Image (tube, helix red, strand yellow):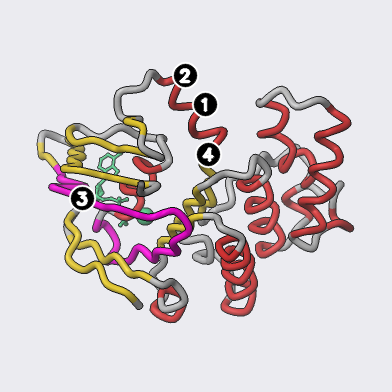
Amino acid sequence: MPLIELTGIERVFTLGGSAVHALAGFDLVVEAGEFVAVMGASGSGKSTLLNLLGLLDRPDAGTYRLADRDVTTLSADEQARVRRERIGFVFQSFHLVPRLSAAENIGLPLMLAGIDPAERARRVARALEDVGLANRADHRPDQLSGGQRQRVAIARATIMQPALILADEPTGNLDRATGEEVVRLLETLNAGGVTLLMVTHDAALGARARRRVVLQDGRKIRDEPV
Ligand code: ADP
Ligand code: MG
């Protein structure tokens, strides 16, 4: 049973009277534990794809099965629950809450899931250690470097131990060395069994995945082992 099964996905945006097929006739099967690089020119549909996979958006047609369950037809509340329990998202611009500390940002999903404060504190402390930020727990995002912010975002994305991590250009705002560290962290998670889909423009980073899916104008034009 694959973790992800997209069949006949269509996503059309209408803007100023003209329609953009952000995804068209899109099929994709991903097995649990894979590391897939999603590549393609700007505007080819990569973020649209990740947003659909992350249940942040709905397709106009087609079905999405996640762990053998049709998640396309779930209510917004049910989708939010699936997202919280199974999916971690890492964005190019980190999307941390500015007024919260690193520890509070990481603990947010636990709080939303109703985990009690003592257990929360334990898990956040361990997550901070795992991403090498034990000594930055009380820093706010504006008191952290870009690479540190992205590591906080990764810790937040993984604190619920999701089956799937979706990373949309996670190194796009980082210099090469820092980006390298972030990818290494994602690779470590994948080695631990988490399924990883990473959008990247960077061919060298894309080559670190074991499979490459290339989009063009909302269609999949290549899908090959790396
Ligand atoms: P990528 O991430 O590969 O750069 P996107 O998935 O963001 O591409 O966008 C694919 C296409 O869909 C682009 O032509 C973009 O302009 C269009 N698009 C994406 N989101 C929207 C939106 N919310 N409204 C209108 N058009 C959109
Ligand atoms: Mg994008």
Pointer 2 with pointer 1, Cβ within 8 A: yes
Mark 2 or mark 4, which is nearer the start of the sequence? Answer: 2
User: In the image, 76: left or right of 49?
Assistant: right
The amino acid pointed to by label 3 is Asp
Mark 2 or mark 3, which is nearer the start of the sequence? Answer: 3
The amino acid pointed to by label 2 is Asp
Magenta range is: 20-44
Residue 62: quadrant of the picture = top left
* Marker disc for residue 86: 4
Q: Nearer the viewer, residue 16 or 137?
A: 137
Label 4 to label 2, Cα distance in Å? 14 Å
Residue named by callout 1: 81
Residue named by callout 2: 77
**Magenta residues: mostly which secondary structure?**
strand
Label 2 to label 1, Cα distance in Å? 6 Å
Residue 41: quadrant of the picture = bottom left
Pointer 3 with pointer 1, Cβ within 8 A: no
Label 1 to label 4, Cα distance in Å? 8 Å
Pointer 1 with pointer 4, Cβ within 8 A: no
Where residue 31 appears, as percent x and y from the top left, is 38, 55
